[in-house]
Amino acid sequence: DTGVSQDPRHKITKRGQNVTFRCDPISEHNRLYWYRQTLGQGPEFLTYFQNEAQLEKSRLLSDRFSAERPKGSFSTLEIQRTEQGDSAMYLCASSLIVAAETQYFGPGTRLLVL
Amino acid sequence: AQSVTQPDIHITVSEGASLELRCNYSYGATPYLFWYVQSPGQGLQLLLKYFSGDTLVQGIKGFEAEFKRSQSSFNLRKPSVHWSDAAEYFCAVGLYSGGGADGLTFGKGTHLIIQP
C-alpha cells in the first residue's frame, strides 16, 4: 500500500493561467475525492468520483474547475483562468465503496496564484 | 446541511497533561464522525471514527473520543500528551450513500501546542 499520491506538491502560477493537478489513489479504491483547504480552515469538499463517474459536485466548484477520472484510476483537477482566491492546498482522498469506510488523504498540492 | 464546530482555535497543554478537544456537530440524524490530525507538511491522518455501537471509541496514538448524542458532541481526549502530538486536529462528519462515503464536512480545526 503506497498511499494516495499527488503531483505536483507545489505550484506557483500567475493569475489567468491554467493549472492541472494529478491524484493517484490507493489501488483498488473505487472512490476518489477532491478537497480544498485554505489557510486556517478545514478542508472543504469539492467533488468525488465512483470509478469514472463524477457523482457529486460542491457549489464551491465553479465553472473554472473541472475534474476527471477517465479510467477509474488516477484523477486530474484543472483550474482555468486562475485567480488569487484559488490559492490553497488541494487535497485528494480515496476510499473503498464499503459502508462506513475511511477516506485516506494524500499530502496535497499547494497552489499559489500571483 | 450538516456543520461542525470546533470552538477552540488554539489549545496549549503541558507535556504529560491530559487533553480534551471539543467538537459539536449539527445534523438531522446521527452522522458518521471522525477525528483527523494534520502535521506540518503531512497529509491528514485518521485518528479514530464512530459509526455506531459503543459511544467510546479508541484510536491510534492513545487517543479516544466519546460520542454524546444528547449534546451533539464528539470530543477527543488523551490522558497524557507528548510533544509529538503538537499538530492541527480536525473533526469531521460524513454521510454515506450507495454504500460509500460522500464528501466529509470538516471543522475549522484546533491547533494544539505542547509546552515542555
Image: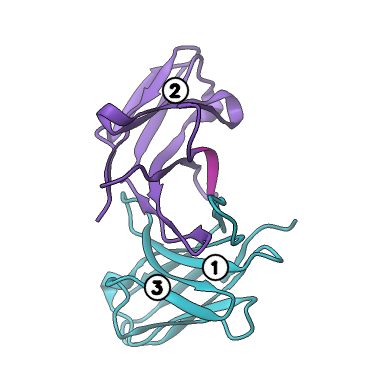
Chain colours: A cyan, B purple
Name the spot of residue A5 as percent of width and height, x first.
63, 64
- Looking at the rendered image, the quarter that the N terminus of chain A falls into is bottom right
Q: Secondary structure at mark 1?
A: strand
The kind of residue on which mark 3 rests is Glu
Residue A32 — which label? 1
Q: Are marks 3 and 1 on the same chain?
A: yes
Which of the pair A22/B25 is nearer the observer? Answer: B25
Name the spot of residue B81 as percent of width and height, x first.
50, 19
Identity of the residue furthest to the top in this view? B17
> Height in image: A59 above or below B72?
below
Write the residue at 45% across / 12% down.
B17
Output the chain of dot 1: A
Q: Tell me the quarter of the picture where residue A7 sits.
A: bottom right
How far apart are the alpha carbons under marks 2 and 3?
34 Å
The magenta segment is: B44-49
**In magenta stretch: residue B50:** no
The kind of residue on which mark 1 rests is Leu
Q: Secondary structure at mark 3?
A: strand
* Pointer 2 residue: B77
Q: Earlier in the sequence, mark 3 or mark 1?
A: 1
Which of the pair A83/B77 is nearer the observer? Answer: B77
> Height in image: B80 above or below A108?
above
Q: Secondary structure at mark 2?
A: strand
How far apart are the alpha carbons under marks 1 and 2?
30 Å
Q: Looking at the magenta stretch, what is its main secondary structure?
A: strand
- Report if the CB atoms under discs 3 and 1 are less than 8 Å apart: no
* Pointer 3 residue: A56
